[in-house]
Amino acid sequence: MPEKRAKKSAKRPVRRALQSRSRATVDAIVKATARILAERGWTALNTNAIAARAGVSIGSVYEYFPNKQSILNVIIDRHLAAGEAKLAEATSILSSGKDADDIVEAVVSGFIQLHQDDPRLHRALSTEVPISPAQRRRIEALRSKIVIAVTSALSEYVDGAELKATLLVETADALAHRWFVDKVGLPVSASTMAGETSTMLKSYVSAGRSD
Amino acid sequence: MPEKRAKKSAKRPVRRALQSRSRATVDAIVKATARILAERGWTALNTNAIAARAGVSIGSVYEYFPNKQSILNVIIDRHLAAGEAKLAEATSILSSGKDADDIVEAVVSGFIQLHQDDPRLHRALSTEVPISPAQRRRIEALRSKIVIAVTSALSEYVDGAELKATLLVETADALAHRWFVDKVGLPVSASTMAGETSTMLKSYVSAGRSD
Amino acid sequence: MPEKRAKKSAKRPVRRALQSRSRATVDAIVKATARILAERGWTALNTNAIAARAGVSIGSVYEYFPNKQSILNVIIDRHLAAGEAKLAEATSILSSGKDADDIVEAVVSGFIQLHQDDPRLHRALSTEVPISPAQRRRIEALRSKIVIAVTSALSEYVDGAELKATLLVETADALAHRWFVDKVGLPVSASTMAGETSTMLKSYVSAGRSD
Amino acid sequence: MPEKRAKKSAKRPVRRALQSRSRATVDAIVKATARILAERGWTALNTNAIAARAGVSIGSVYEYFPNKQSILNVIIDRHLAAGEAKLAEATSILSSGKDADDIVEAVVSGFIQLHQDDPRLHRALSTEVPISPAQRRRIEALRSKIVIAVTSALSEYVDGAELKATLLVETADALAHRWFVDKVGLPVSASTMAGETSTMLKSYVSAGRSD
DNA sequence: GATGAATGAGCTTTCATTCAT
DNA sequence: CATGAATGAAAGCTCATTCAT
């Protein structure tokens, strides 16, 4: 069995090669899942379809994932990671920001960017896929982090920063979802709605400030 | 033919008794469905569970509903009907309202009342249950009606009433959902959040008005 | 309860009236069954459909018939009775017949008349409805009777009457079914096929006769 | 990459082994279906019984067949294929035949062979199983082909070949069914009946020929 | 007797998961 | 490790039959 010896004698490279192959397989599975979810929805998502779409066997899917939910968890995790990345990115803007309006602008545009990236997948994740309590906690934790960051950024400009940050974040998130994911019944374009959203929130955040 | 007369005179009560039995069965099925949905979620909702929870046989479920989805449709319909009733009720307030602030108050409190009624069921319906395109259209139609009513009410007080009505309705709906259905991560009580929501929206709606 | 006394005091007329009502109900059920069978086939035949079509309640169906099969049995029985009636009628022709050709003619036209009466029902009965072994025996018994009658009629004209009668009866039955029930792929009209059938069978029956 | 080569060289046998396993499963399912149909009839045929009898799980049945009807289609197809094979085989006899009697003999014995092969299954297929319109067309198409072949074979010996071929084929088919499938009420052995059938048909076909 | 609501065994089918190859 | 055939619990639904009214 030459393969076996090869593995033993040259563990590192082969392992690394294998790992990259593994990673590729995992990635193919996750991407296939996301594609099916975005294109055909939760009801059409089954493990055989995932395997077929990923170009691997169903056995391989279970080689890398203990069950179907765990694939979804990866997708949700990636979404949350994207959210965290966006948060980190925004934090620098927030901290280096000039005034409260810039902060509102950063929050609103941050959520819009988040929802504009693959809105069909986003919709599926937020309205079809059953979320486990653990995932829900992770989502809320991220939300909380964002609120804290925004609170801290706002606190030097306004009073009652936490309350305002909470409203700002929730409203920006919900309305970005409506304008760019649901996209229905809008009297004007989504970006006009986004502008109006900013206007409303800037006015709200700045209301009654000390200066 | 005395039997015939006897039968005729007896038919009504029997018929009525039967009808009330039927209605009770239908009601038990719908209620059981709503209960399971609220308590154990869409994933746990199956026709056998519905029958068991309703205390009827699976056959009775299919005596009154052609399929599983149709039971859900009734529940969704009832929810929409509740929304429409609330709208009708609010409309009188809107039309007899004194100023723009009253309108905002009516919209915000209307959505809060809507979301406070069985929030777990509300959550299940809005984030788990697969909604058919037809149902989605009905939901959007109701939203649209509400926006129109609010637009009309606002138009005598402010400029750009439609845009403002849209933002007002969407924000009120989304935030009421967050404060009273999701109920997570709030720095203060839900009703304080609601008060803040009203404040923000009143200020937004009244901003830049002519007088 | 005046009805009850009425029943007791005037048993006969009421009983007869009831019996005729019963007979009407039974008849409606049987006719509805036959209609559904002829029009929509065995797969569409269920007891609720029968009750609805007969204009009676499902309970009444089970008042008069112990189960679904027993309704079918009545239909099959009626068909067999029609066959027996046709046989009795034909027997007089057979016995008063002038020659072997008349006998063949009588047999062929007898089967044609049998198959022409409601061919869709006939088709359903012969190719869809599951026949119980008991029914099959009854059918074979009737066949047997016919063969015996034909044998007896033929025996004064030909040798080997039983063999010839068997072939005659089976061929006439099978071909009448093909020409008038299946009605497919015929190069000429069904009645021309029937004429040819007679010709063939007359020639066969008369072949090698003593005269 | 020795593994790859090893895999490649090993793939074929494995693939073949898998294929033969699949084929064995498919075959077991089809055979089980045919057995149940022959022994216990259409009423007793359900997918669970098929799986149990085939010694496979119900899941495997649906791995290879999209639904119950498709299993039956395979059986019907096989029957039709057997009929077509018999036709092809008979055609050579027909074309190389010496006279009209040989043709009749070939047709009669062809149908007998067809019906003698698993007569119980044959009976179930022809009198119980619901045949789709498409299958019915296929059956009639085969019948039509046979009639055309026989017509062509007969046309050099007799006048009105098509009419005679139609009667010949229909009679041979129907009577072979009666003698070898239904097997009831025969005064003499099935093969004697078959001989008589041939005699009748030979005489009919040759009647009124020119020579 | 008549009614029709209720019953539940039993059917077809799906799909997450396992395991022999 | 990869494969994909096989598994079987579980779901949706039908319909002959029963039984309270």
Image: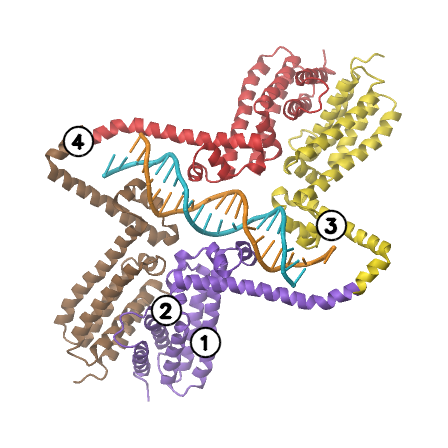
Chain colours: A yellow, B red, C brown, D purple, E cyan, F orange
Name the chain letter of the residue that bears numbered label 1: D
- CB of mark 3 within 8 Å of CB of mark 1? no
At 34% across and 28% down in the image, what residue appears?
Answer: B17
The residue where tag 1 is placed is D86
The residue where tag 2 is placed is C186
The residue where tag 3 is placed is A28
A90 left or right, relative to C75: right
Up/down of A180 relative to D2, above or below: above
Residue C133 location, x and y as percent? 30, 60
F21 left or right, relative to D114: left
Looking at the picture, which amino acid does disc 4 mark?
Glu
Looking at the picture, which amino acid does disc 2 mark?
Leu
- CB of mark 2 within 8 Å of CB of mark 4? no
Name the chain letter of the residue that bears numbered label 2: C
The residue where tag 4 is placed is C3
Q: CA distance from mark 1 to mark 4?
A: 72 Å
- The lab-note entry on whether marks 3 and 2 share a chain reads no
Looking at the picture, which amino acid does disc 3 mark?
Ala
C76 left or right, relative to A153: left
Q: CA distance from mark 4 to mark 3?
A: 80 Å
At 52% across and 34% down in the image, what residue appears?
Answer: B73
Q: Could one spot residue B155 in this view of the protein?
A: no
